[in-house]
Image: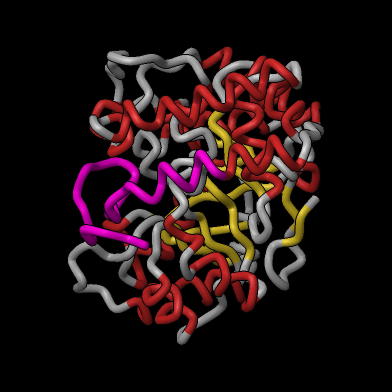
Amino acid sequence: MKQIGRTTVNISDLVYGCWQMGGDYWGPVDIKAAEETVQYALIKGITTFDTAYCYGAGKSEELLGKALQDFRREDYQLSSKLWVTSLGGTEAVKACEDSLRRLQTEFLDIYFIHYPDPTGTVPISETMEALMYLKHSGKIKSIGVSNFSLAQLKEAQKYGDIDVIQPCYNLLWRFIDKDILPYCKEQNISVMAYSPLAQGLLSGKYGPGDCREDGRSHAALFQEPYYGKALKVTECLKEIAVEYETTPGNLALNWVMKKDGITAPITGIRKKKHVDDGLKALDIQISDEAMARIEEESRAYTATLPHFKSFFAEAVLEEDVK
């Protein structure tokens, strides 16, 4: 278990990502299979579940709450997220209470601001005041931000506790290495990394010309020339995986787990097999030489990327990032 910041919240070494349970970005959901997989994961030791209102407009939260209703609340941890349409003070409190109702729980272990206000009309002070109220009232135990820049993180800290952040982080997407990760280490802010497999790109399942027909068709790294270049990193993982009798995806997940400053990765899980694979990744031990080769391929790739605004679109923030 890993501690969240300076709080009393502890999370599992691997976090169960519940975006796919919303049925929007990832396609249709087998409800019975999803419930059984959540329960299987908890029994196997993955005790922390990360969801959000915008994952199917509450559907993921509802399905997760139903799946966990027969388990003791002290045996698992829940994190959810405040969507950008509810950043105002009153709206934020109501949104949290609605999430609690859907999840069938009296409190959230972590409540994230999902994204900074895209309109710039709601002061972060107002949102943070609402979250601090929720924390003091016992409805949330810790506060996090997701997809914030360093400047936005520092601004939020002026008005309350930031215990944890949730950025995208993987072998192909390492923008937080520059400033956010060192700052969080300095401030004792935990880091829960989402998309550790780059939405499956590091799984080794895709090749040249493969087309994603779900929401990933718009994601930055699934576009050329970035997609083709990313496959070189995947090929490196495939070669090393053969040597260590594991999978490219497990190597990629293990790399995030071992990264200094990362508290835990959040991995999307659809099947019981994904649970077993994720747990196997915890125990992988590879040589320093193999790790150095992975690191070299990763840095060579990420050095060529423009600074995208988001993993999920092609908009660029800066033309060049060193």
The reply, left or right, for residue 72 in relation to residue 272 is right
Image quarter in which the C terminus is found? bottom left
Number of labels in the image equals: 0
**Of residues 321 and 317, which is closer to you in this image?**
321
Taking the view exactly as shown, the residue that stands out farthest to the bottom is 158
Q: Which residue is drawn at 59% across and 58% down?
A: 191
Q: Residue at x 45, y 80 (%)?
A: 154
**Of residues 116 and 222, which is closer to you in this image?**
222
The reply, left or right, for residue 2 in relation to residue 141 is right
Q: From this viewpoint, is residue 69 visible? A: yes
Query: Residue 63, position in %: x, y?
Result: 52, 29
Q: Which residue is drawn at 43% across and 65% down?
A: 93
Whether 1 is drawn above or below 23: the answer is: below
Q: How is the image coloured?
A: secondary structure
Whether 215 is drawn above or below 81: the answer is: above
Q: Which residue is drawn at 59% across and 29% down?
A: 66
Query: Residue 245, position in %: x, y?
Result: 75, 16
Q: From this viewpoint, is residue 102 visible? A: no
Q: Quadrant of residue 57?
A: top left
Q: Was residue 184 drawn as part of the magenta stretch in this picture?
A: no
Q: Magenta residues? A: 296-322
The reply, left or right, for residue 56 in relation to residue 261 is left
The reply, left or right, for residue 248 in relation to residue 278 is left
Query: Residue 14, position in %: x, y?
Result: 69, 40
**Of residues 98 and 155, which is closer to you in this image?**
155
**Of residues 16 and 62, which is closer to you in this image?**
16
Query: Residue 135, position in %: x, y?
Result: 59, 71
